[in-house]
Image (spheres, helix red, strand yellow):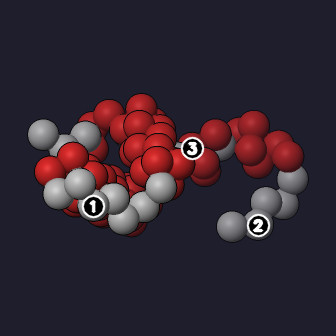
Amino acid sequence: MLLKSISEVQLNPDIFSNTKDDKEEIKKEIKDLVEKLNYYAHLYYDEDNPQISDYEYDMMNNRLKALEKENPELILS
């Protein structure tokens, strides 16, 4: 979306809110991250066969935490 002026932002702050499609994409990303984190945790702890570095795991976990913080209504139970 192109803005015509800064006043458009001031008058309509909702232009930055997530649309329904955005929420669906975020929900899918959360689900994918949870599945990947569970898979890699199983390999690491149960199989003693890590497939990714601790750093990569931490980055995925941090992304998940950030998404859940910004979208608490999408947290999977």
Are the residues flagged by discs 1 and 3 in contact, CB closer than 8 Å? no
Residue at 64 percent of width and 40 percent of height: 13
- Inter-mark Cα distance, 1 to 3: 46 Å
Kindly identify which residue carries mark 2: 2
Question: In this rendering, would 57 be left or right of 3?
Answer: left
Q: Which quadrant is home to the N terminus?
A: bottom right
Name the element at disc 1: loop
Residue at 84 percent of width and 60 percent of height: 4
Question: In this rendering, would 71 be left or right of 16?
Answer: left
Lower position in the chain sequence, tag 2 or tag 1: 2
Front position in the image: 15 or 68 = 68
Residue 61: x, y in percent? Answer: 41, 44
Residue 48 figure quarter: bottom left
Is the residue marked by circle 3 packed among few (<14), some (14-19), or many (20+) residues within 10 Å? few
Residue 19: x, y in percent? Answer: 44, 57
Task: Please give the label number shown on residue 75.
Answer: none
User: Which three-letter amino acid code belongs to the residue tagged 2?
Assistant: Leu
Front position in the image: 23 or 76 = 76
Q: Is residue 69 visible?
A: yes
User: Which three-letter amino acid code belongs to the residue tagged 3?
Assistant: Asp
User: Which three-letter amino acid code belongs to the residue tagged 1?
Assistant: Asn
Name the element at disc 3: helix
Front position in the image: 28 or 43 = 43
Task: Please give the label number shown on residue 14.
Answer: 3
Residue 65 figure quarter: top left
Are the residues flagged by discs 3 and 2 in contact, CB closer than 8 Å? no
Residue 28 figure quarter: bottom left
Lower position in the chain sequence, tag 3 or tag 2: 2
Q: Is residue 34 visible?
A: no
Asked if residue 46 is positioned above or below residue 22 in the image, the reply reads above
Front position in the image: 49 or 61 = 49
